[in-house]
Image (cartoon, rainbow, N blue to C red):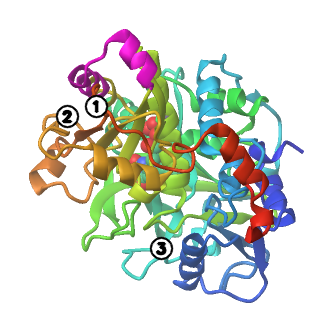
């Protein structure tokens, strides 16, 4: 059996064994109750709920909520995310980012085609295709429908076969064999759909639910166009992903997946989709017309587990997975452009609406970067990129600030950003139209509402940081730490 990063069932087994998932044997209703339990698990940092008996589902069909929610202990905070990527569960953001960036520079490890896999233990075709057999949840009372695909990815391929795209996006159930959901023209699924449409054809399509966790993470990552996510997954996991040919349309799908939908993405047919509680933390009153996905076959592992993301206020997977993968992509772009950048991090608390970038102060000084030039260069790199399209706000800080600590970021914003000169607006920059504060015109044009906020200290700043780490000799700090419990403070020393 592949490692947990390459096999959802093994990943689930690991969470259960580590106490980071709990099995809920009692019947739970996919109508709102699954969503409510999952939301509360995110918001209290409880283990992931495995719903073993969702009401109305075929026997054995299960749901896993909060597959990449945060944990409650400092050692295990990022543990579910780290387990997606094959890292120790104690891994922290810097280690996770460097791991993701390293794999971007490693040669791709292409998937291996195998004859059969657990994802095809059961096969439904023709009239047997009935998506209602899955426990499809209504996740929030404000949602316009039930969502089957909240934690799965689309597989599409360019007509010439050179570009295979794996990408996460949501899909809402319409009826027993159709779904609807976004395929934005700026996202790779939209670009490939446009290639097929120009030929007058529908787009051959598959969707994977309960995918290998590393593959799900890569499919939520804004790698550049023409880059195949499947080769990146292999580089990331250190072993190729095993794929099998889909039953009906020849696409290759991960062998170690829970559920695979096969069919096509319509060229011209649309249907009402949403509204849905979304990544920024809001639900809006109206849905939109979105393309229709036709399901011609379903294959699944025995006793399949449907993973579910109940999107909304942080932290959920749009922050822990999407935000982290954007952070890694942006970090790599900024470094590769030669900018003196230390780290980049989409604070989960900011709901993937800002990214904090720390600047290597020593390098900045040595290379003579003025604040104005740095602001301009960061905006140039990010606002023209696929990754930077997704995040509207950039915050620049010096590298004494740990960008992964929201407390330090708030302190820097309050004490280092000059209200008159620190805010730079980029009204012409293209960006994702889903950002809540955009005007209707900006959302229509998918342009504007983008900014760089500088919290860089002036070169002649004379303050030092008044803190435990900043205000005492190293030797005294060590003495205090060594004596901490003797002072009467219990066990904690760090
Ligand atoms: C849980 C989750 C849900 C997501 N939902 C959507 C979505 O509904 N629509 C969308 O365009 N992107 C969504 N994304 C973000 C995309 O997966 C991400 O931008 C990715 O880069 C898209 O793939 P591409 O770069 O190959 O186009 C989601 C990401 C995650 C982790
Ligand atoms: Mn892509």
Residue 399: which disc? none
Specify the quadrant of the image occupied by residue 192. Answer: top left
Main SS of residues in magenta: helix
**In which quadrant of the rendered image does the N terminus lie?**
top right
Is residue 157 something that shows in the picture?
A: no
Q: Decide: marks 1, 2 in contact (CB < 8 A)? A: yes
Disc nearer the start of the sequence (2/3): 3
* Nearer-the-camera pick, 191 or 130: 191
Residue assigned mark 3: 146
Residue assigned mark 1: 383
Q: Position of residue 378 (x, y in %)?
A: 31, 26
Specify the quadrant of the image occupied by residue 102. Answer: top right
- Decide if residue 121 is on the left or right side of residue 333: right
Disc nearer the start of the sequence (3/1): 3
Q: Position of residue 274 (x, y in %)?
A: 35, 67
Q: CA distance from mark 1 to mark 2?
A: 6 Å
| Residue at horizontal 23 percent and vertical 24 percent from the top | 376
Is ligand 1 less than 8 Å from the beta carbon at label 2? no
* Nearer-the-camera pick, 398 or 465: 465
| Residue farthest along the top direction in this orientation | 367
| Residue at horizontal 37 percent and vertical 10 percent from the top | 367
Q: Secondary structure at mark 2?
A: loop
Tag nearer the camera, 3 or 1: 1
Residue assigned mark 2: 429
- Decide if residue 340 is on the left or right side of residue 240: left
């Amino acid at each position: 059996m592949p490692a947990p990063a390459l096999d959802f069932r093994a990943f689930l087994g690991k969470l259960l064994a580590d106490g980071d998932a709990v099995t809920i044997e009692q019947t739970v209703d996919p109508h709102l109750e699954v969503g409510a339990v999952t939301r509360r698990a995110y918001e209290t940092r409880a283990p992931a709920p495995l719903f073993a008996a969702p009401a109305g589902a075929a026997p054995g069909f299960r749901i896993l909520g909060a597959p990449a929610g945060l944990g409650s202990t400092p050692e295990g905070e990022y543990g579910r995310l780290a387990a997606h990527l094959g890292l120790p569960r104690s891994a922290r953001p810097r280690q996770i980012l460097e791991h993701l960036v390293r794999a971007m520079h490693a040669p791709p490890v292409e998937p291996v085609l195998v004859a059969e896999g657990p994802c095809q233990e059961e096969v439904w075709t023709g009239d047997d295709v009935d998506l209602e057999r899955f426990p499809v949840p209504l996740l929030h009372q404000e949602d316009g429908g039930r969502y089957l695909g909240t934690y799965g990815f689309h597989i599409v391929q360019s007509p010439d076969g050179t570009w295979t795209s794996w990408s996460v996006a949501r899909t809402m159930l319409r009826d027993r064999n159709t779904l609807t959901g976004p395929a934005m023209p700026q996202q790779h699924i939209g670009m490939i759909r446009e290639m097929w449409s120009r030929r007058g054809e529908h787009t051959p399509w598959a969707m994977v639910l309960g995918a290998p966790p590393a593959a799900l993470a890569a499919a939520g990552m804004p790698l550049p166009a023409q880059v195949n996510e499947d080769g990146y997954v292999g580089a990331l996991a250190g072993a190729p992903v095993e794929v099998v040919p889909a039953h009906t349309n020849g696409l290759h799908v991960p062998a170690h997946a829970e559920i695979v939908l096969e069919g096509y993405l319509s060229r011209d047919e649309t249907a009402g989709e949403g509204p849905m509680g979304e990544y920024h933390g809001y639900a809006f009153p109206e849905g939109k017309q979105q393309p229709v996905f036709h399901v011609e076959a379903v294959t699944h592992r025995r006793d399949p587990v449907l993973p579910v993301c109940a999107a909304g206020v942080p932290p959920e997977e749009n922050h822990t997975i999407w935000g982290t993968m954007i952070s890694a992509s942006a970090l790599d772009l900024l470094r590769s452009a030669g900018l003196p950048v230390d780290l980049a991090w989409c604070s989960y608390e900011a709901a993937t609406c800002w990214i904090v970038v720390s600047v290597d102060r020593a390098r900045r000084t040595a290379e003579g970067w003025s604040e104005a030039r740095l602001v301009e260069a960061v905006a140039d790199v990010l606002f023209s990129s696929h990754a930077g399209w997704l995040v509207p706000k950039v915050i620049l800080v010096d590298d004494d600030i740990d960008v992964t600590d929201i407390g330090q970021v708030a302190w820097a914003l309050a004490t280092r950003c000059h209200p008159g000169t620190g805010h730079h607006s980029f009204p012409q920059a293209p960006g994702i139209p889903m950002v809540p504060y955009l005007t209707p015109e900006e959302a229509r044009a998918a342009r504007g509402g983008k900014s760089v906020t500088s919290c860089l200290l002036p070169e002649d700043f004379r303050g030092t940081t008044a803190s435990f780490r900043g205000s005492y000799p190293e030797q005294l700090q060590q003495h205090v730490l060594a004596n901490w419990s003797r002072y009467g403070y219990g066990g904690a020393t760090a």
